[in-house]
Image (spheres, rainbow, N blue to C red):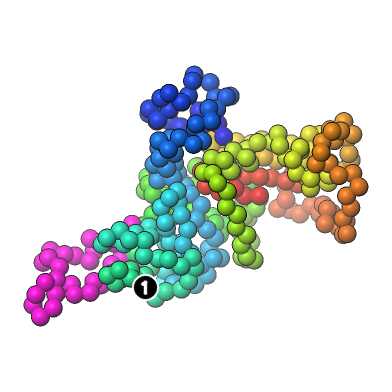
Amino acid sequence: MNVATSIAPDAAAAFDGIWPDDGSSRIPARVYTDPAVYRRELDRFFYGRHWSYVGLEAEVPEPGRFKRTAIGERSVIMIRNRQGEINVLENRCAHRAMRFCQEKFGKVKTLVCPYHQWNYNHDGKLLGVPFQRGVKGKGGMPEDFALTDRSLRRLKVTVRNGVVFASFDDDVEPFEDYLGPDVLRYFDRTFDGRELVVQGYSRQRIPGNWKLMMENIKDPYHPGLLHTWFVTYGLWRADNQSQLVMDRHHRHACMISKRSETVDAEVTKGVTSFRKNMQLNDESLLDIVAEPWWGGPTVCMTTIFPSVILQ
């Protein structure tokens, strides 16, 4: 990650005493761990003028279906409304700010906060409040209380070829401009409009924050040394035809490689992950069948700043 180009000048205060000079080739370790820097990143990147990945349309196939996820540290709900549109709502009741949705997935007629049963529709509009007029002429909400003033926070949403992104900033640039033409090409290489099917989920948790994983996939140095599968079968080795494509702001990156059919002894010598005698039970697993959508590269790792990696 090119930290120097990712963080605007007015964020410099967060780096006082951390960043030693104006260079960007040597990143101080504290950039990855300092709480003040991390909070600044949450505000500027995840809650600012950026698009964050929230899910796939296929995960919410019908009205009322929802998926709970997060943008930064804020819980959000991706839900399909009765008109078939995708909404992303902050999971924060307008009454006492409770994270009312606890299920990861589900289907609901309305969204109800269990604390005081405030009830919202799929667009986040408040439908009803218990005892709004009080009981037997006593209590209740003030006379100027209006349901229309107390909706859930609704994020700006964009959907491209079945992939859903959202932003807390209504003035965020169009998604296509955000990616730029070079990165958009590789996004569309994976998501070209074909129907998506969710086969399942595999989850891993690591003791770190968002920067560690994003940097890992922008590092072309390690795959040809670390990963046995890549090195042994030529998917990513030092002698591959490869390139790194970035957008003009250096936010997003596509790490691209084309499989080598032969083994160059010079690039595998001393590489401990290379297993010369490793064999596949089914060699067809490595068959390369060029299809129109493919476009050449065998491997493409795309990072879309700040929140998703497409492999």
Q: Please report the bounds of the magenta region as a residue range.
A: 125-153
Residue at the spot x=43%, y=66% of the render? 102
| Residue named by callout 1 | 110
Total marks drawn? 1
Q: Is residue 44 visible?
A: no
Instruction: Tell me if 137 is positioned left or right of 109 in this view.
Output: left
**Above or below for 150 versus 30:** below
Residue at the spot x=89%, y=44% of the render? 276
Residue at the spot x=19%, y=75% of the render? 131
Q: Position of residue 66 (x, y in %)?
A: 46, 67
**Above or below for 51 versus 111:** above
Q: Position of residue 163 (x, y in %)?
A: 54, 57
Instruction: Tell me if 143 is positioned left or right of 245 in this view.
Output: left
Is residue 39 shown in magenta? no
**Above or below for 129 versus 301:** below
Q: Looking at the figure, which quarter contains the N terminus?
A: top right
Q: Position of residue 151 (x, y in %)?
A: 29, 62
Q: Position of residue 223 (x, y in %)?
A: 73, 40
Q: Is residue 103 visible?
A: yes
The furthest residue to the left = 137
